[in-house]
Structure formats: structure tokens, C-alpha cells
Image: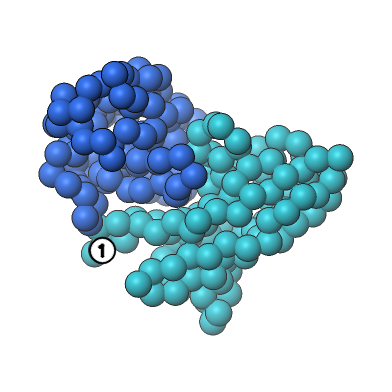
Chain colours: A cyan, B blue
């Protein structure tokens, strides 16, 4: 059974930092591109960042470029998001999600971790 | 930057009726279009990818169609568990950006 479990969310002051983790199991994490997606309270889904299966390429939404860093440790099947210079507008539930796995005809999402930026 | 626009924002439907949700892209997407269902407090659930392929475990009452810039999600006969928010989602091949529509809420009439 596939599990993606995020952790590391919490309350942080504007300008602060947090590091999110996403522990994966039940699928071939090392062969899968991974994304972070966020959802502000009562709002829609916003893509944040992507990392290629081997970590060789990373892409970011303009809203987080230069402040957030996505990384992965395939030996531990874990995805990370380092968030620096946090702003009020970064307050959201952060989900890790896999690319669509065509052979499985689905993709995988974690349950989300809440990040609240507030003074 | 591709912009995804969903309509309507809210759709009021009676159980057993058909629901038709629309998604328009600001430029052609080929078939890299997916649909998600999200219920309050839950994770998004993939329904359709490749514009028309049902994901694993998705009932046949969900169908997707369209190409280019116009896409549709149809729920043939709404069940009580189908009342939720639905998002269309463009997944670019490379660079692998994702773009979501703003969502359509399907509510009980």
C-alpha cells in the first residue's frame, strides 16, 4: 500500500524558515518525479515545485523561486522542501505528490502538513 | 504561462442527474489534462488523466473529453459521494510545471 507522509509544518513568523519532509513507501520512489503543491485556507490548489526522479532537475513556481528549495534522498525515499524568507501568503496546507504513474494509472498524494506564517 | 479557467464556479445538481464541468486553457495542451476530486478535509483524488483515461478505481460514471483548449468532465448520474470540488489540472511535459484551474464546486440542489 502506498503512503506519503508529510511532516515539519507548524507556525513560523514572517521571514522565518521551515523544512518539510515527505516520507514515501509502497512504490518506486526513486523512479518517480515528485512535486509539492499547496492549498491556502479555503482556496484552490497551487503548484510549488518539482524535482526529477534522480534529483537532476528542479523547477519552481515564480511565487517561491529563490526562497524555497526542493530536494530528495532516494536512499531514504524522502522528499524535502526547505522554505526560507516565509511570508504571510505562504500560509497553506502543503502536499507532496507524485507524477502520474502510468503503469498504475494513478498518482499519489500525502495527507498534507499545515504551514502557518504569522506574527 | 498557461491559465486554466473552470466553469461554472458552482454547479447545483440533484442526485441522479448529469453534471457537466468545463475547463478552458489559454493555449493548446494536447492531452495533458487531468481532473481531481477533493472533499472537505481530504487530499485531492485523481479521476481522469490524458484528458479521457479514468484513473485506477474510478467509477465509470466519470468521463473526460476534449482536446486543445476545451475539456469537459461529465458525471453521468450524481451519487451522494460525488458532491465535492473538482479541479482541472494541466501537467506540462517539460518543463514539468503543473497548473490547476480554480475549481468547480458541485453541490446538492
- Seen at 20% across and 32% down, the residue is B78
Tell me if A9 is positioned left or right of A23 in this view. Answer: right
Place of residue A96 in the rendered image (x, y in percent of width and height, measured from the top left): 52, 56
> Percent position (x, y) of residue A36?
54, 52
Query: Where is residue A9 drawn, in percent x and y?
Result: 68, 56
The residue that mark 1 highlights is A104
| Above or below B55: residue A47 | above
Q: Nearer the viewer, residue B31 or B78?
A: B78
Q: Residue at x 15, y 28 (%)?
A: B16
Residue A11 visible to an observer of this rendering = yes
Foreground residue among B41 and B43: B41
Answer left or right for B13 relative to B104.
Answer: left
Q: Is residue A103 left or right of residue A9?
A: left
Q: Where, quadrant-wise, is the C terminus of chain A in this rendering? A: top right
Judging from the image, mark 1 belongs to the subunit labelled A
- Please name the residue shown 76% across and 36% down the image: A88
Amino acid at each position: 500500500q502506498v503512503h506519503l507522509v508529510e511532516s515539519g509544518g507548524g507556525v513560523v513568523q514572517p521571514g522565518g524558515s521551515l523544512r518539510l519532509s515527505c516520507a514515501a513507501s509502497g512504490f518506486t520512489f526513486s523512479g518517480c518525479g515528485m512535486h509539492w503543491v499547496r492549498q491556502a485556507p479555503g482556496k484552490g490548489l497551487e503548484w510549488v515545485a518539482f524535482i526529477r526522479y534522480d534529483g537532476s532537475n528542479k523547477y519552481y513556481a515564480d511565487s517561491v523561486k529563490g526562497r524555497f528549495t526542493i530536494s530528495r534522498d532516494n536512499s531514504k525515499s524522502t522528499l524535502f522542501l526547505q522554505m526560507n524568507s516565509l511570508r504571510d501568503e505562504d500560509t497553506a496546507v502543503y502536499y507532496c505528490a507524485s507524477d502520474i504513474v502510468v503503469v498504475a494509472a494513478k498518482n499519489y498524494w500525502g495527507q498534507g502538513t499545515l504551514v502557518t506564517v504569522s506574527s | 504561462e498557461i491559465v486554466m479557467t473552470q466553469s461554472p464556479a458552482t454547479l447545483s445538481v440533484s442526485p441522479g442527474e448529469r453534471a457537466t464541468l468545463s475547463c478552458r486553457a489559454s493555449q493548446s495542451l494536447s492531452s495533458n489534462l487531468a481532473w481531481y476530486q477533493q472533499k472537505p478535509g481530504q487530499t485531492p483524488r485523481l479521476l481522469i488523466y490524458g484528458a479521457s483515461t479514468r484513473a485506477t478505481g474510478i467509477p465509470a460514471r466519470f468521463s473526460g473529453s476534449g482536446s486543445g483548449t476545451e475539456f469537459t468532465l461529465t458525471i453521468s448520474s450524481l451519487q451522494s459521494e460525488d458532491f465535492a470540488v473538482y479541479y482541472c489540472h494541466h501537467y506540462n511535459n517539460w518543463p514539468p510545471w503543473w497548473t490547476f484551474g480554480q475549481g468547480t464546486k458541485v453541490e446538492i440542489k
